[in-house]
């Protein structure tokens, strides 16, 4: 089934984050945030090629250098058209199956990736696209989207709205009549997508992630999502570090355009950082 399929995981990364510039190269213990995320993705049970997809702008030379130091393939493409960047990277590395994972998920649970891939391959040929995001139930920062190369190519040919180009996959889940789509819920039966934030956009997120790594990594470098939740239950003060940003995501800017996302799946930013 999957063993003769070329699985390519594309990690989109850039230095020019508007809210926290250079966040992907900020230190987590003795390595960069991006290196720690790669480390976690290398723990999945599937054989997959990892590709860091960055832009052609000069400041992203640093991303390419980091990729080389990590011995991870790097593709450089359009800064703002992420759909084209993903498509060209997938094409270059002859992908049959493409995973889109953003670089702001350094706490991603490898088992989350495995479970989405399990559903994709256990239903071999049935789905064009499988994710754990529509709707999301895992804590924010466990974002996994899997698609066939044919699906990605179809989107690349058809998508035209700026939002679709910037976020790569909205055209798929906004047009369920055109694609066979499946969603994987967190097996706990809980929905922590709006209450727990394991992703990074703000300084408080970085402080939260750093604390989690300091607490859990020395005990078990392969710590799980459940380990993080247990830590937060034992030490709720850690949860408070970035609590003001829980539920804040990019959907909030496009509620007037999105048909398959509602206002309950995002929050407005109440306290804007200067």
Image (tube, rainbow, N blue to C red):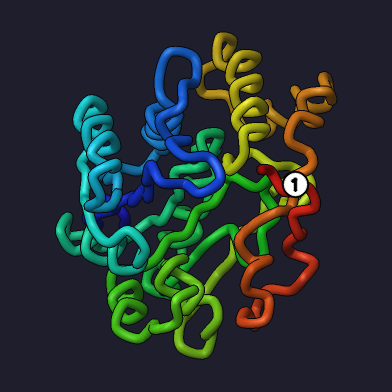
Residue at figure coordinates x 64%, y 68% from the top left: 253
Q: Image check: 237 left or right of 6?
A: right
Q: Image check: 108 left or right of 59?
A: right
Name the residue tied to disc 1. 246
Snapshot quadrant of residue 35: top left
Residue at figure coordinates x 58%, y 43% from the top left: 201
Question: Viewer-proximal residue, 182 or 247?
Answer: 247
Question: Where does residue 29 sit, x and y in percent of width and height?
Answer: 49, 14
Q: Quadrant of the C terminus?
A: top right
Residue at figure coordinates x 53%, y 40% from the top left: 20
| Residue furthest to the top | 218
Image vertical order of residue 273 relative to residue 130, above or below: above
The 10 Å Cα crowd at callout 1, few under 14, some 14 to 19, many 20 or more, is many
Question: Viewer-proximal residue, 119 or 38?
Answer: 38
Q: Quadrant of the N terminus?
A: bottom left
Question: Viewer-proximal residue, 201 or 190?
Answer: 201
Snapshot quadrant of residue 229: top right
Question: Where does residue 119 sit, x and y in percent of width and height?
Answer: 50, 59
Residue at figure coordinates x 83%, y 20% from the top left: 234
Image vertical order of residue 86 relative to residue 127, above or below: above
Observer able to see residue 174:
yes
Image vertical order of residue 148 relative to residue 65, above or below: below
Question: Where does residue 51 sit, x and y in percent of width and height?
Answer: 27, 46
Q: Image check: 221 left or right of 266?
A: left
Question: Where does residue 113 sit, x and y in percent of width and height?
Answer: 48, 47
């Amino acid at each position: 089934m999957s063993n003769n399929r070329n699985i390519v995981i594309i990690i989109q990364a850039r230095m020019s984050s508007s809210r926290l510039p250079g966040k992907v190269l900020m230190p987590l213990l003795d390595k960069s945030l991006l290196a720690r995320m790669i480390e976690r993705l290398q723990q999945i049970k599937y054989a997959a090629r990892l590709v860091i997809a960055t832009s052609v702008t000069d400041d992203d030379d640093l991303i390419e250098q980091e990729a080389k130091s990590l011995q991870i393939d790097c593709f450089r493409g359009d800064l703002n058209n992420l759909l084209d960047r993903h498509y060209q990277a997938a094409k270059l590395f002859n992908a049959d199956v493409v995973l889109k994972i953003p670089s702001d998920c350094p706490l991603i649970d490898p088992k989350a990736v495995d479970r989405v891939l399990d559903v994709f391959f256990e239903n071999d040929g049935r789905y064009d696209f499988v994710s754990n995001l529509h709707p999301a139930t895992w804590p924010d920062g466990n974002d996994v989207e899997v698609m066939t190369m044919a699906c990605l190519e179809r989107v690349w040919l058809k998508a035209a709205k700026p939002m679709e180009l910037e976020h790569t996959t909205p055209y798929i889940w906004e047009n369920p009549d055109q694609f066979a789509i499946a969603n994987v819920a967190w097996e706990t039966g809980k929905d922590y997508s709006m209450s727990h934030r394991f992703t990074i956009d703000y300084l408080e997120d970085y402080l939260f992630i750093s604390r989690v790594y300091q607490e859990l990594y020395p005990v078990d470098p392969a710590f799980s999502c459940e380990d993080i939740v247990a830590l937060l239950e034992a030490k709720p003060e850690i949860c408070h570090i970035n609590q003001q940003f829980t539920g804040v995501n990019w959907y909030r800017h496009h509620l007037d355009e999105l048909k398959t996302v509602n206002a309950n799946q995002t929050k407005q930013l109440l306290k804007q950082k200067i």
